[in-house]
Amino acid sequence: MVGPAQRPITGRLNGPPDEVAAAIASAASATKAVSSYLTFLTSEKRASPKTIENYARDLMRFFEFLFDHLEGDANLDDLANLSVSDFRAFLAHRRREGLSAKSIARTLSTLRGFYGHLEREGLATNHALKRLKTPKIPHSIPKPVSETGALNLLEDAKTISAEPWVAARDTSIVTLLYACGLRITEALSLNQCDAPFSETLRIIGKGNKERIVPVLPAAKEAVDQYRVLCPHPLDGDDPLFVGVRGKRLNPREVQKLMTNLRARLGLPDTATPHALRHSFATHLLSAGGDLRSIQELLGHASLSSTQVYTEVDADRLREIYDRAHPAQKGAGSTRKS
Protein backbone atom coordinates (compact mmCIF):
# COMPACT_ATOMS: atom_id res chain seq x y z
CA MET A 1 0.00 0.00 0.00
CA VAL A 2 1.30 3.45 -0.88
CA GLY A 3 1.92 5.67 2.17
CA PRO A 4 0.37 9.15 2.41
CA ALA A 5 3.69 10.89 1.78
CA GLN A 6 4.18 9.12 -1.55
CA ARG A 7 0.63 8.74 -2.83
CA PRO A 8 -0.29 10.50 -6.07
CA ILE A 9 -3.70 12.15 -6.04
CA THR A 10 -5.54 11.22 -9.21
CA GLY A 11 -8.96 11.96 -10.59
CA ARG A 12 -10.23 13.85 -7.54
CA LEU A 13 -12.50 16.02 -9.66
CA ASN A 14 -13.99 13.07 -11.56
CA GLY A 15 -15.56 11.20 -8.65
CA PRO A 16 -18.95 11.36 -6.88
CA PRO A 17 -20.38 14.88 -6.33
CA ASP A 18 -19.79 14.83 -2.57
CA GLU A 19 -16.12 13.93 -3.06
CA VAL A 20 -15.72 16.60 -5.72
CA ALA A 21 -17.29 19.18 -3.38
CA ALA A 22 -14.96 18.12 -0.57
CA ALA A 23 -11.94 18.38 -2.86
CA ILE A 24 -12.93 21.88 -3.96
CA ALA A 25 -13.52 22.99 -0.35
CA SER A 26 -10.14 21.60 0.71
CA ALA A 27 -8.40 23.38 -2.16
CA ALA A 28 -10.17 26.60 -1.18
CA SER A 29 -8.72 26.25 2.33
CA ALA A 30 -5.22 26.13 0.85
CA THR A 31 -5.98 29.22 -1.24
CA LYS A 32 -7.18 31.04 1.88
CA ALA A 33 -3.95 30.05 3.63
CA VAL A 34 -1.92 31.68 0.85
CA SER A 35 -3.98 34.86 1.11
CA SER A 36 -3.59 34.82 4.90
CA TYR A 37 0.19 34.44 4.59
CA LEU A 38 0.54 37.35 2.16
CA THR A 39 -1.60 39.51 4.48
CA PHE A 40 0.68 38.50 7.37
CA LEU A 41 3.75 39.56 5.38
CA THR A 42 2.17 42.92 4.60
CA SER A 43 0.71 43.84 7.99
CA GLU A 44 3.00 42.08 10.47
CA LYS A 45 6.32 41.85 8.65
CA ARG A 46 5.86 45.12 6.72
CA ALA A 47 7.38 43.47 3.65
CA SER A 48 7.84 45.71 0.64
CA PRO A 49 5.39 45.52 -2.29
CA LYS A 50 8.19 44.01 -4.41
CA THR A 51 8.77 41.28 -1.82
CA ILE A 52 5.05 40.51 -1.66
CA GLU A 53 4.94 40.37 -5.45
CA ASN A 54 7.88 37.92 -5.57
CA TYR A 55 6.46 35.69 -2.81
CA ALA A 56 3.01 35.65 -4.44
CA ARG A 57 4.59 34.68 -7.77
CA ASP A 58 6.63 31.91 -6.13
CA LEU A 59 3.54 30.45 -4.45
CA MET A 60 1.49 30.70 -7.63
CA ARG A 61 4.17 28.75 -9.53
CA PHE A 62 4.27 26.20 -6.67
CA PHE A 63 0.53 25.56 -6.81
CA GLU A 64 0.57 25.46 -10.62
CA PHE A 65 3.26 22.78 -10.40
CA LEU A 66 1.29 20.84 -7.78
CA PHE A 67 -1.82 20.91 -9.98
CA ASP A 68 0.06 18.90 -12.63
CA HIS A 69 2.13 16.92 -10.16
CA LEU A 70 -0.85 15.80 -8.08
CA GLU A 71 -3.38 15.86 -10.93
CA GLY A 72 -5.64 18.32 -9.16
CA ASP A 73 -5.74 21.35 -6.87
CA ALA A 74 -3.61 20.85 -3.76
CA ASN A 75 -5.34 20.98 -0.38
CA LEU A 76 -3.91 21.35 3.12
CA ASP A 77 -3.50 17.58 3.55
CA ASP A 78 -1.55 17.45 0.31
CA LEU A 79 0.72 20.26 1.50
CA ALA A 80 1.39 18.38 4.73
CA ASN A 81 2.15 15.12 2.92
CA LEU A 82 4.57 16.37 0.26
CA SER A 83 7.88 14.50 0.35
CA VAL A 84 11.45 15.70 -0.12
CA SER A 85 11.33 14.34 -3.68
CA ASP A 86 8.16 16.37 -4.36
CA PHE A 87 9.87 19.60 -3.30
CA ARG A 88 13.01 18.69 -5.25
CA ALA A 89 10.89 18.02 -8.33
CA PHE A 90 9.37 21.49 -8.02
CA LEU A 91 12.76 23.20 -7.64
CA ALA A 92 14.15 21.20 -10.57
CA HIS A 93 11.12 22.27 -12.62
CA ARG A 94 11.84 25.93 -11.80
CA ARG A 95 15.50 25.44 -12.69
CA ARG A 96 14.52 24.09 -16.10
CA GLU A 97 12.43 27.23 -16.57
CA GLY A 98 15.63 29.23 -16.30
CA LEU A 99 15.63 30.41 -12.68
CA SER A 100 19.04 31.38 -11.28
CA ALA A 101 20.46 29.86 -8.10
CA LYS A 102 19.60 33.09 -6.28
CA SER A 103 15.96 32.90 -7.41
CA ILE A 104 15.78 29.22 -6.48
CA ALA A 105 17.07 30.09 -3.01
CA ARG A 106 14.41 32.79 -2.70
CA THR A 107 11.73 30.35 -3.84
CA LEU A 108 12.82 27.90 -1.15
CA SER A 109 12.75 30.73 1.40
CA THR A 110 9.19 31.56 0.27
CA LEU A 111 8.09 27.96 0.80
CA ARG A 112 9.71 27.81 4.24
CA GLY A 113 8.00 31.03 5.24
CA PHE A 114 4.64 29.80 3.95
CA TYR A 115 4.94 26.44 5.70
CA GLY A 116 6.02 28.21 8.89
CA HIS A 117 2.79 30.21 8.66
CA LEU A 118 0.75 27.04 8.12
CA GLU A 119 2.35 25.48 11.20
CA ARG A 120 1.80 28.56 13.39
CA GLU A 121 -1.85 28.64 12.36
CA GLY A 122 -2.27 24.92 13.06
CA LEU A 123 -3.20 24.22 9.43
CA ALA A 124 -0.41 21.88 8.29
CA THR A 125 3.04 20.65 9.26
CA ASN A 126 5.62 19.28 6.86
CA HIS A 127 8.99 18.03 8.08
CA ALA A 128 10.28 17.10 4.62
CA LEU A 129 10.80 20.73 3.63
CA LYS A 130 13.12 21.25 6.60
CA ARG A 131 15.50 18.63 5.19
CA LEU A 132 16.14 20.54 1.97
CA LYS A 133 19.39 22.47 1.72
CA THR A 134 19.51 25.99 0.29
CA PRO A 135 21.47 26.01 -3.00
CA LYS A 136 24.80 27.80 -2.98
CA ILE A 137 24.54 31.25 -4.50
CA PRO A 138 27.46 32.46 -6.66
CA HIS A 139 29.31 35.26 -4.93
CA SER A 140 28.54 38.58 -6.56
CA ILE A 141 30.00 42.02 -5.97
CA PRO A 142 27.84 45.16 -6.15
CA LYS A 143 28.45 47.36 -9.18
CA PRO A 144 28.34 50.99 -8.05
CA VAL A 145 28.23 54.04 -10.27
CA SER A 146 31.42 56.13 -10.22
CA GLU A 147 31.40 59.37 -8.23
CA THR A 148 31.39 61.37 -11.46
CA GLY A 149 28.61 59.22 -12.90
CA ALA A 150 26.48 59.62 -9.77
CA LEU A 151 26.87 63.40 -9.78
CA ASN A 152 26.01 63.51 -13.49
CA LEU A 153 22.85 61.51 -12.78
CA LEU A 154 21.80 64.06 -10.16
CA GLU A 155 22.44 66.91 -12.56
CA ASP A 156 20.69 65.34 -15.56
CA ALA A 157 17.63 64.41 -13.51
CA LYS A 158 16.91 68.15 -13.25
CA THR A 159 16.31 68.47 -16.98
CA ILE A 160 15.10 65.08 -18.19
CA SER A 161 11.43 66.08 -17.90
CA ALA A 162 9.89 69.13 -19.55
CA GLU A 163 7.43 69.35 -16.64
CA PRO A 164 9.19 71.31 -13.83
CA TRP A 165 7.48 69.55 -10.93
CA VAL A 166 8.23 66.10 -12.41
CA ALA A 167 11.88 67.07 -12.91
CA ALA A 168 11.99 68.27 -9.28
CA ARG A 169 10.42 65.01 -8.11
CA ASP A 170 12.87 62.89 -10.12
CA THR A 171 15.80 64.91 -8.79
CA SER A 172 14.56 64.42 -5.22
CA ILE A 173 14.29 60.65 -5.61
CA VAL A 174 17.69 60.19 -7.27
CA THR A 175 19.25 62.41 -4.59
CA LEU A 176 17.70 60.37 -1.76
CA LEU A 177 18.92 57.09 -3.27
CA TYR A 178 22.48 58.34 -3.61
CA ALA A 179 22.85 60.83 -0.74
CA CYS A 180 20.96 58.79 1.88
CA GLY A 181 21.47 55.22 0.62
CA LEU A 182 17.74 54.49 0.53
CA ARG A 183 16.21 51.52 -1.20
CA ILE A 184 13.77 52.54 -3.93
CA THR A 185 10.83 51.15 -1.92
CA GLU A 186 11.95 53.11 1.15
CA ALA A 187 12.06 56.38 -0.79
CA LEU A 188 8.66 55.79 -2.39
CA SER A 189 7.12 54.76 0.94
CA LEU A 190 7.74 58.21 2.42
CA ASN A 191 4.62 60.23 3.20
CA GLN A 192 3.93 63.95 3.33
CA CYS A 193 4.19 63.87 7.14
CA ASP A 194 7.86 62.82 6.76
CA ALA A 195 8.63 66.22 5.16
CA PRO A 196 9.98 68.83 5.46
CA PHE A 197 13.08 66.89 6.41
CA SER A 198 15.17 67.80 9.41
CA GLU A 199 18.83 66.79 9.69
CA THR A 200 17.85 63.13 9.99
CA LEU A 201 15.22 60.85 8.50
CA ARG A 202 13.57 57.85 10.18
CA ILE A 203 13.35 54.91 7.79
CA ILE A 204 11.50 51.62 8.28
CA GLY A 205 13.39 49.13 6.14
CA LYS A 206 13.42 45.41 5.49
CA GLY A 207 12.09 43.22 8.29
CA ASN A 208 10.45 46.25 9.92
CA LYS A 209 13.93 47.37 10.99
CA GLU A 210 14.14 51.06 11.86
CA ARG A 211 17.17 53.22 11.19
CA ILE A 212 18.04 56.89 11.28
CA VAL A 213 19.89 58.36 8.29
CA PRO A 214 21.40 61.84 8.07
CA VAL A 215 19.91 64.13 5.42
CA LEU A 216 22.37 66.18 3.40
CA PRO A 217 21.36 69.78 2.60
CA ALA A 218 21.22 68.87 -1.11
CA ALA A 219 18.58 66.20 -0.41
CA LYS A 220 16.54 68.50 1.82
CA GLU A 221 16.63 71.32 -0.74
CA ALA A 222 15.63 68.97 -3.58
CA VAL A 223 12.59 67.67 -1.67
CA ASP A 224 11.58 71.17 -0.53
CA GLN A 225 11.70 72.37 -4.15
CA TYR A 226 9.59 69.43 -5.30
CA ARG A 227 6.96 70.06 -2.62
CA VAL A 228 6.66 73.69 -3.69
CA LEU A 229 6.18 72.74 -7.36
CA CYS A 230 3.98 69.64 -6.94
CA PRO A 231 0.47 70.51 -8.20
CA HIS A 232 -1.30 67.88 -6.11
CA PRO A 233 -2.68 69.08 -2.72
CA LEU A 234 -1.35 66.35 -0.44
CA ASP A 235 -0.77 66.23 3.29
CA GLY A 236 -0.52 63.94 6.31
CA ASP A 237 -0.38 60.28 5.34
CA ASP A 238 -0.63 61.02 1.62
CA PRO A 239 2.39 59.81 -0.39
CA LEU A 240 5.31 62.20 -0.70
CA PHE A 241 6.22 61.17 -4.24
CA VAL A 242 3.31 60.93 -6.66
CA GLY A 243 2.68 60.33 -10.34
CA VAL A 244 0.79 62.60 -12.71
CA ARG A 245 -2.56 61.42 -11.28
CA GLY A 246 -1.58 62.16 -7.71
CA LYS A 247 -1.20 58.51 -6.65
CA ARG A 248 1.90 57.04 -4.99
CA LEU A 249 4.67 56.72 -7.56
CA ASN A 250 5.29 53.21 -8.86
CA PRO A 251 8.87 51.86 -8.63
CA ARG A 252 8.70 51.06 -12.36
CA GLU A 253 8.60 54.80 -13.07
CA VAL A 254 11.91 55.24 -11.26
CA GLN A 255 13.33 52.27 -13.17
CA LYS A 256 12.31 53.94 -16.43
CA LEU A 257 13.81 57.23 -15.25
CA MET A 258 17.17 55.54 -14.62
CA THR A 259 17.00 53.78 -18.00
CA ASN A 260 16.59 57.15 -19.71
CA LEU A 261 19.28 58.82 -17.62
CA ARG A 262 21.91 56.17 -18.23
CA ALA A 263 21.13 56.22 -21.98
CA ARG A 264 21.73 59.98 -22.02
CA LEU A 265 24.95 59.68 -20.04
CA GLY A 266 26.29 56.52 -21.68
CA LEU A 267 26.31 54.59 -18.39
CA PRO A 268 26.18 50.76 -18.29
CA ASP A 269 23.00 48.76 -17.67
CA THR A 270 24.20 48.17 -14.11
CA ALA A 271 23.45 51.84 -13.31
CA THR A 272 20.10 51.02 -11.70
CA PRO A 273 18.29 52.74 -8.81
CA HIS A 274 19.75 50.15 -6.42
CA ALA A 275 23.23 50.82 -7.82
CA LEU A 276 22.95 54.32 -6.33
CA ARG A 277 22.59 52.70 -2.90
CA HIS A 278 25.70 50.63 -3.66
CA SER A 279 27.43 53.86 -4.70
CA PHE A 280 26.43 55.53 -1.43
CA ALA A 281 28.15 52.76 0.55
CA THR A 282 31.19 52.40 -1.69
CA HIS A 283 31.92 56.12 -1.86
CA LEU A 284 31.58 56.45 1.92
CA LEU A 285 34.04 53.59 2.36
CA SER A 286 36.43 55.22 -0.11
CA ALA A 287 36.29 58.42 1.92
CA GLY A 288 37.33 56.56 5.07
CA GLY A 289 33.95 55.58 6.53
CA ASP A 290 33.99 52.57 8.86
CA LEU A 291 31.98 49.44 8.13
CA ARG A 292 29.92 49.54 11.33
CA SER A 293 28.64 53.04 10.59
CA ILE A 294 27.88 52.14 6.98
CA GLN A 295 26.06 49.02 8.19
CA GLU A 296 23.80 51.20 10.35
CA LEU A 297 23.18 53.68 7.54
CA LEU A 298 22.22 50.90 5.11
CA GLY A 299 20.08 49.07 7.66
CA HIS A 300 21.89 45.76 7.21
CA ALA A 301 21.02 43.22 9.89
CA SER A 302 24.53 41.73 9.85
CA LEU A 303 27.97 43.11 9.13
CA SER A 304 28.57 40.36 6.56
CA SER A 305 26.08 42.06 4.22
CA THR A 306 28.10 45.27 4.42
CA GLN A 307 31.52 43.64 4.14
CA VAL A 308 30.93 42.95 0.44
CA TYR A 309 31.69 46.63 -0.18
CA THR A 310 35.27 46.06 0.96
CA GLU A 311 35.73 43.94 -2.18
CA VAL A 312 34.41 46.76 -4.34
CA ASP A 313 36.91 49.13 -2.80
CA ALA A 314 39.85 46.73 -2.51
CA ASP A 315 42.26 49.19 -4.14
CA ARG A 316 41.41 51.86 -1.57
CA LEU A 317 41.87 49.41 1.32
CA ARG A 318 45.20 48.25 -0.09
CA GLU A 319 46.33 51.87 -0.27
CA ILE A 320 45.35 52.42 3.38
CA TYR A 321 47.19 49.23 4.34
CA ASP A 322 50.35 50.26 2.49
CA ARG A 323 50.29 53.66 4.13
CA ALA A 324 49.27 52.74 7.66
CA HIS A 325 50.26 49.18 8.60
CA PRO A 326 53.27 49.05 10.99
CA ALA A 327 54.89 46.25 9.01
CA GLN A 328 54.74 48.35 5.87
CA LYS A 329 56.11 51.40 7.65
CA GLY A 330 59.11 49.45 8.77
CA ALA A 331 59.69 47.65 5.50
CA GLY A 332 61.94 50.34 4.11
CA SER A 333 64.02 50.83 7.22
CA THR A 334 67.41 49.21 7.69
CA ARG A 335 67.93 47.05 10.79
CA LYS A 336 70.88 48.17 12.88
CA SER A 337 73.21 45.47 14.18
Image: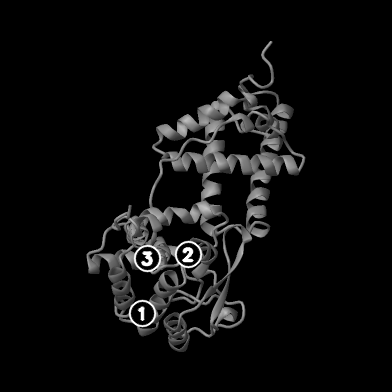
- 282 left or right, relative to 114: left
Distance CA(mark 1)–CA(mark 2): 34 Å
- SS assignment at label 2: loop
- SS assignment at label 1: helix
- SS assignment at label 3: helix
Q: Residue at x 52, y 33 (%)?
A: 65
Furthest-right residue in this view? 122
Crowding near pointer 2: few (<14 within 10 Å), some, many (20+)? Answer: few
Distance CA(mark 1)–CA(mark 3): 30 Å
Residue 72 in view here: yes
Furthest-bottom residue in this view? 228
Of tags 1 and 2, the one toward the viewer is 2
Crowding near pointer 3: few (<14 within 10 Å), some, many (20+)? Answer: some
- The location of residue 192, given as percent across then percent down, is 56, 80
Residue 269 versus residue 88 in the image, above or below: below
- 275 left or right, relative to 51: left
- 251 left or right, relative to 128: left
Look at mark 2 in the image and give the residue it sits on: 290
Q: Quadrant of residue 19?
A: top right
Q: Quadrant of residue 191?
A: bottom right
Look at mark 1 in the image and give the residue it sits on: 167
Q: Residue at x 55, y 32 (%)?
A: 133
Query: Which comes before the other along the chain, label 1 or label 3?
Result: 1
Amino acid at pointer 1: Ala
Amino acid at pointer 3: Ser
- The location of residue 131, given as percent across then percent down, is 61, 29
- State the residue in front, 171 or 276: 276
Distance CA(mark 2)–CA(mark 3): 10 Å
Amino acid at pointer 2: Asp
- The location of residue 75, given as percent across then percent down, is 67, 34
Q: Residue at x 54, y 58 (%)?
A: 300
Look at mark 3 in the image and give the residue it sits on: 286
